[in-house]
Image: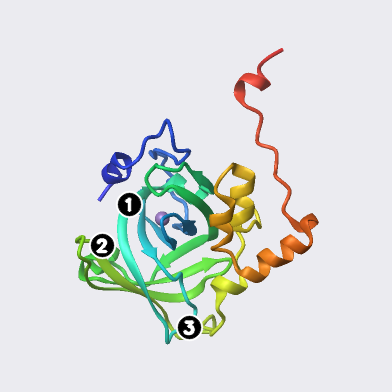
Amino acid sequence: MGLGEYRRKRRFGVTPEPPGGEKRPGKALLFVVQKHVATRLHYDFRLEWKGVLLSWAVPKGPSPDPAVKRLAVQVEDHPLEYANFEGIIPRGEYGGGTVMVWDRGTWLPEVADVDATLRKGELKFTLHGKKLRGSWVLVRTRRDQGGKPQWLLIKHRDAFASSEEITTTQPRSVISKRLLAEIAWHEGGDVEKAASADPPDEIRRLVRNPALVARRKRRKPSVWHSTAG
Ligand code: MN
């Protein structure tokens, strides 16, 4: 697919999302799951393949329970650097809202010919993340009304299968430990909307004890500051 559609939908002077183009030769394949509260809450499931992140929007998020099949609508490929993106997409821009790196790690195909199985519509793979582990499968079912391919994301039975509701029990960022509300608060997003997608118990805990709110980390100094005498 490439990055054409991704770039057409975005104004890189306005959104802090990356335009893409970085290469990572010889490294293990990345995967990332981003919790994204935009028009609606969803989880963006992304697998590195051939220099881009193949991407699916999973409205309910992944489930480690093999009895649960989660709808995953395939969307445009994203650049590899997107795996590091956590913050705010400005209001009015494509996907405007708050983005959290909910899980990240590496993945391994369980098949010899990934391209052939993607065409066929059934990809088996192993995830090595902080939250998602073990064997999974993506199965293509049909196209939605907009023509986007619909897949199901399903956990295989193995030692990492469980009935835990991990989207509720593990709601924080794996790179900053923040809730969505904290990301929105730090980065100037819509805190109320972001908080509506965090578990209510976690928000109540923060409101009762604001000292628990994650401190904002200082940004790296800008180039013109560090070079100024
Ligand atoms: Mn999204």
| Element on which disc 1 rests | strand
Q: Residues within 10 Å of mark 3 (few under 14, many from 20)?
A: some
The quarter of the image that holds ligand 1 is: bottom left
Callout 3: CB less than 8 Å from ligand 1: no
Which residue in the protein does label 3 denote?
Answer: 65
Task: Report the mark closest to the observer, 2 or 1.
Answer: 1
**Foreground residue among 55 and 88:** 88
Determine the residue positioned at 54% across, 71% down. Answer: 167
Name the N-terminal-most of marks 2 and 3: 3
Residue name at image x 51 percent, y 51 percent: 98
Q: Is residue 116 above or below residue 76?
A: below
Q: Indicate the amino acid at tag 2.
A: Asp
Name the mark on residue 115: 2
User: Please, what secondary structure does the residue beneath circle 2 have?
Assistant: helix
Circle 3: residue type: Asp
Q: CA distance from mark 2 to mark 3?
A: 27 Å
How far across and how far down the image is residue 107, in percent?
Answer: 45, 64
Question: Is ligand 1 within 8 Å of the beta carbon of the residue shown at mark 1?
Answer: no
Rendered image quadrant of residue 40? bottom left
Residue lying furthest top in this view?
A: 229
Image location (x, y in percent) of residue 126: 44, 71
| Earlier-in-chain disc, 3 versus 1 | 3
| Secondary structure found at label 3 | loop
Left or right position of 13 against 179: left
Q: Is residue 175 visible?
A: no
Between 211 and 130, the residue placed more toward the observer is 211
Q: Could you tell me which residue is drawn at 70 percent across and 38 percent down?
A: 218
Disc number at residue 77?
1
